[in-house]
Image (cartoon, rainbow, N blue to C red):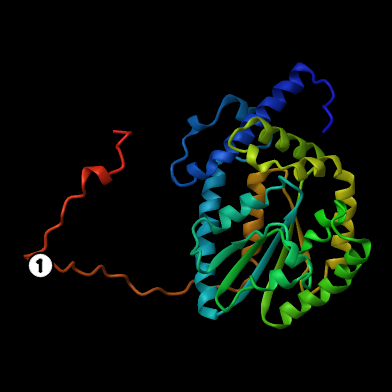
Amino acid sequence: MRNPDPLSSEERDRLMARLEQDLLDGYDEEFELEREDEDHFRSAEDRRIEGMLPRGVYFKELFALQRELVKLQDWVVQERRKVVIVFEGRDSAGKGGVIKRITQRLNPRVCRVVALPAPNDRERTQWYFQRYVSHLPAAGEVVLFDRSWYNRAGVESVMGFCSDEEVEEFFRSVPEFERMLVRSGIQLIKYWFSITDEEQHLRFLSRIHDPLKQWKLSPMDLESRRRWEDYTRAKEVMLERTHIAEAPWWVVPAVDKKRARLNCIAHLLEHFPYQEVPRQEVVLPERVRHQDYLRHPVPETMLVPNRYP
């Protein structure tokens, strides 16, 4: 990856402010577990970033949307719906962040994430879609694909992991494959997360300089950065040839991570005529007690040391 052009002092300050904000964004999951969002969490540099969505507003809207997602989950189970949501986009575009916020408060037995590794030698000889089919939902399930069969139109095509003939066969097959899924009763929703060249560069820098994020950068990611224009051409062809009425593409502007998450979740909810499913009142039963019951103490040798008194 080439070095950026020399920055002025003002540009460097703005870059450092953005890098700090990106670091804070990575820790927001922990803050999201608390309802209170005090203003002292925000640094002076945060306030300098023009147009930044206030964190208090973000959390308020996110919690409201997550409550709706719980209602949607219950409705999917009751109505025995089958839902597949595909998340695609460049490396660091924010797919994982929105998936995490969607699933954060849902039942993993109802809503599960599929993120498949590169195919092994046996899988490479199978029908291309075969390894994805086994992960499709049964009735009352939602499956989120963190990358999907569209790997063939993206990384495999750009990096030369498949032939031009295989890519062309994919484009002939995928519309029929997806129409078949829809005919079988699966609701298929496809999102492409879109970021700019400059934003990806910033996010890669953030990963390089944050020890907790460095694992996210693979040699393939770095090569994808070099081949930005190749990926752009591949994306444009993919959207043009696989945008079908039964399963259209939806593009999420994702330079602003927080707005992208909120916009995507709100848009997702609009796809369903869900209603709140009445729940039976939960009554905690009285614990049965026996006179001869004795709880034995745990041996000291088995206890985890209390390092944080």
Task: Please tell me which residue is depicted at 51% across the width and 64% down the height of the picture.
Answer: 108
Q: Which residue is mark 1?
A: 290
**Position above or below: 54 against 275:** above
Q: Is residue 184 left or right of residue 73?
A: right
Outermost residue toward the left in this view: 291
Quadrant housing the N terminus: top right
Quadrant of the rendered image containing residue 278: bottom left
Judging from the image, what secondary structure is the residue with disc 1 in? loop
Left/right of residue 298 with respect to residue 149 in the rendered view: left
Which of the 4 image quarters holds residue 247?
bottom right
Could you say where residue 163 lies in the image, as x and y percent from the top left?
Answer: 90, 61
Camera-side residue of 47 and 150? 150
Where is residue 152 drawn, in percent x and y? 81, 61
- Residue 165: x and y, percent? 93, 66
**Which residue sits at x=78%, y=78%?**
179
Count of marks, rendered view: 1
Of residues 303 and 173, the one nearer the viewer is 303
Residue furthest top as drawn:
9
Q: Nearer the viewer, residue 46 or 223?
A: 223
Q: Residue at x 21, y 49 (%)?
A: 298
On the question of residue 51 being in view, the answer is yes
Of the residues shown, which amino acid type is indicated by label 1? His
Q: Position of residue 131 (x, y in %)?
A: 70, 69
Is residue 49 something one can see in this rendering? Answer: no
Other-residue count near label 1 (Cα within 10 Å), few / some / many at <14 / 14–19 / ≥20: few
Left or right of 265 in this view: 250: right
**Relative height, residue 88 to residue 274 (above, below):** above
State the quadrant of the C terminus: top left
Q: Residue lying farthest bottom?
A: 184
